[in-house]
């Protein structure tokens, strides 16, 4: 099986995709049920609101402290990992990240790489890049394996195949997995997938993983997982390549447990995950297992743009729990594929503009009701609604003094909209002109167009009243 080309969807297609998703009654029902289940599980893990707020405050402070010292911590992490025998690589963008990993794989004459769950590898579209040079990159997380088999992107950062039913997966396995027959038994489906992956683990020359937390003080890569596939990817193959964003570093090992505790409970409502892996180097003399070679690829890909802005820096506090998606009234109705980006939902709306530029993503920050649910449940207190408002503004304005420019800034600006607002300002700052316009609008109300752009997509057309407020008040005064 080879990876399919899974390219980002232009922002211009978001509205059409969202409309298709909203019209899909089965998809909406599935997502609503899944999200309600996750919301309830999370709530059950935090029965004491006061204790939860204390934990969130601690986690927020850890992430802010780590980001405040990010350049120094990254250098410390590199020094410690290098001393531990890990080879550290730096990638400014997706192209460089893929080139580094492909280079490592080709030096070892690799034909197969097994992958644990890694959103950053999805972000840089590594599978597609590997397939272009004839290397199979096989996802071993069951959800990721399913969507890869079907040529799709994950629809959720924690549960990639949450949009699929067991019947759909059964048909997929029967069609794509050699020797598999149709069964809608979940246990049997998992068994079919595991049988395929078990063979791949034993034959792959290279294994890949993501990183949940990188500890600068000890040079430790921490990996959270439930299926054991991450442990297989990082211990069975001779070469282990880890990939992560530069923001995942923390200073001390003691900073990990508070974040870990909130991550698992916020993501899937689990008190703790099945596996928590800590990797500090390759196999040492006398050890019987583990990789002989370990690499870490640290990826920027727009993160320094967010880091350079004091307000937008809060975006990098994210620990990728997905709670904001689970509680978002927009995401729960349209699912992840409508966004067309690696990171959907509220977190994707604020991080994708830095990775891809506002020209490609300026529609995404508008895909929110600004209800505030995402900010209320974020375990590290990212002020997502405030950042969405900021990005909406940046998409409409050119770079301003005192604010670092964003790639694609002003991409949503329209001369027509500028003219409309200029006209609005002229009307509302000149009383005589305003009253004349009101009089004219009431007399010509029959000419009001029935279609009024985005407004009438989900609302009735606006139509001037038969009389202006000034006329109604004057008539009332005369009637006294």
Image (cartoon, rainbow, N blue to C red):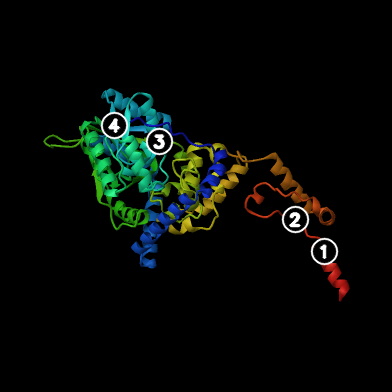
Q: Quadrant of residue 69?
A: top left
Work out whether mark 3 precedes mark 2 in sequence or the reverse, and give the earlier one: 3
Q: Which residue is mark 2?
A: 463
Q: Where residue 374 sits: x, y (%)?
A: 47, 55
Q: Are marks 3 and 1 in contact (CB under 8 Å)?
A: no
Q: Is residue 389 found left or right of 382 in the rendered image?
A: right
Give how far apart the Cα atoms at labels 4 and 1 are: 74 Å
Q: Are marks 3 and 4 in contact (CB under 8 Å)?
A: no
Local packing at callout 1 (Cα closer than 10 Å; few below 14, some 14-19, many 20+) is: few
* Residue farthest front in this picture: 182
Local packing at callout 2 (Cα closer than 10 Å; few below 14, some 14-19, many 20+) is: some
Work out whether mark 3 precedes mark 1 in sequence or the reverse, and give the earlier one: 3
Q: Which residue is mark 4?
A: 113
Q: Closer to the camera, 258 or 20?
A: 20
Q: Secondary structure at mark 1?
A: helix
Q: Where residue 341 sits: x, y (%)?
A: 47, 40
Work out whether mark 1 precedes mark 2 in sequence or the reverse, and give the earlier one: 2
Give how far apart the Cα atoms at labels 1 and 2 are: 17 Å
Q: Secondary structure at mark 4?
A: strand
Give how far apart the Cα atoms at labels 3 and 1 are: 62 Å
Q: Are marks 4 and 1 in contact (CB under 8 Å)?
A: no
Q: Which residue is mark 3?
A: 151
Give how far apart the Cα atoms at labels 4 and 2 are: 61 Å
Q: Where residue 383 sits: x, y (%)?
A: 48, 54
- The residue drawn where x is 38% and y is 39% is 120
- Residue 109 in view here: yes
Q: How many marks?
A: 4
Q: Secondary structure at mark 2?
A: loop
């Amino acid at each position: 099986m080879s990876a399919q080309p899974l390219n980002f969807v232009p922002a211009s297609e978001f509205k059409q995709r969202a409309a298709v998703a909203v019209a899909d009654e089965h998809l909406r029902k599935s997502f609503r049920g899944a999200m309600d289940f996750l919301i309830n599980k999370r709530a059950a893990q935090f029965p004491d609101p006061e204790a939860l707020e204390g934990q969130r405050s601690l986690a927020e402070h850890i992430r802010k402290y780590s980001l405040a010292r990010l350049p120094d911590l990254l250098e410390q992490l590199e020094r410690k990992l290098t001393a531990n025998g890990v080879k550290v690589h730096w990638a400014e963008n997706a192209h460089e990240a893929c080139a580094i990993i492909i280079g490592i794989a080709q030096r070892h004459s690799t034909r197969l790489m097994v992958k644990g769950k890694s959103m950053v590898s999805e972000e840089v579209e590594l599978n597609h890049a590997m397939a272009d040079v004839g290397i199979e990159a096989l996802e071993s997380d069951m959800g990721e394996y399913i969507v890869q088999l079907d040529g799709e992107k994950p629809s959720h950062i924690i549960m990639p195949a949450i949009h699929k039913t067991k019947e759909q997966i059964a048909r997929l396995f029967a069609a794509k997995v050699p020797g598999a027959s149709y069964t809608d038994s979940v246990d049997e489906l998992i068994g079919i997938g595991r049988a395929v992956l078990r063979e791949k683990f034993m034959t792959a020359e290279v294994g890949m993983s993501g990183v949940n937390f990188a500890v600068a003080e000890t040079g430790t890569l921490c990996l959270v997982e439930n299926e054991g596939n991450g442990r297989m990817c990082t211990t069975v193959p001779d070469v282990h390549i880890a990939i992560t964003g530069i923001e995942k570093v923390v200073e001390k090992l003691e900073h990990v447990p508070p974040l870990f505790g909130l991550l698992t409970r916020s993501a899937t409502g689990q008190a703790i995950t099945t596996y928590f892996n800590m990797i500090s180097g390759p196999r040492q003399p006398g050890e019987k297992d583990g990789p002989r070679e370990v690499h870490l690829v640290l990826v920027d890909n727009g993160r320094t743009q967010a880091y350079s802005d004091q307000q937008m820096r809060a975006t990098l506090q994210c620990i990728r729990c997905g709670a904001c998606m689970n509680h978002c009234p927009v995401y729960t109705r349209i699912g992840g594929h409508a966004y067309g980006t690696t990171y959907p939902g509220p977190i994707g709306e604020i991080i994708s503009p830095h990775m891809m530029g506002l020209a490609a993503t300026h529609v995404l920050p508008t895909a929110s009701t600004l209800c505030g649910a995402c900010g209320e449940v974020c375990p590290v207190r990212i002020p997502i609604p405030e950042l969405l408002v900021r990005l909406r503004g940046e998409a409409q304005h050119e770079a301003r003094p005192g604010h670092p420019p964003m790639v694609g800034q002003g991409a949503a600006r329209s001369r027509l909209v500028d003219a409309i607002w200029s006209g609005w300002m002229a009307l509302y700052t000149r009383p005589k002109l305003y009253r004349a316009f009101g009089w004219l609008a009431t007399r010509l109300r029959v000419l009001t167009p029935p279609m009024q752009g985005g407004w009438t997509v989900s609302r009735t057309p606006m139509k001037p009243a038969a009389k202006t407020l000034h006329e109604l008040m004057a008539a009332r005064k005369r009637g006294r």
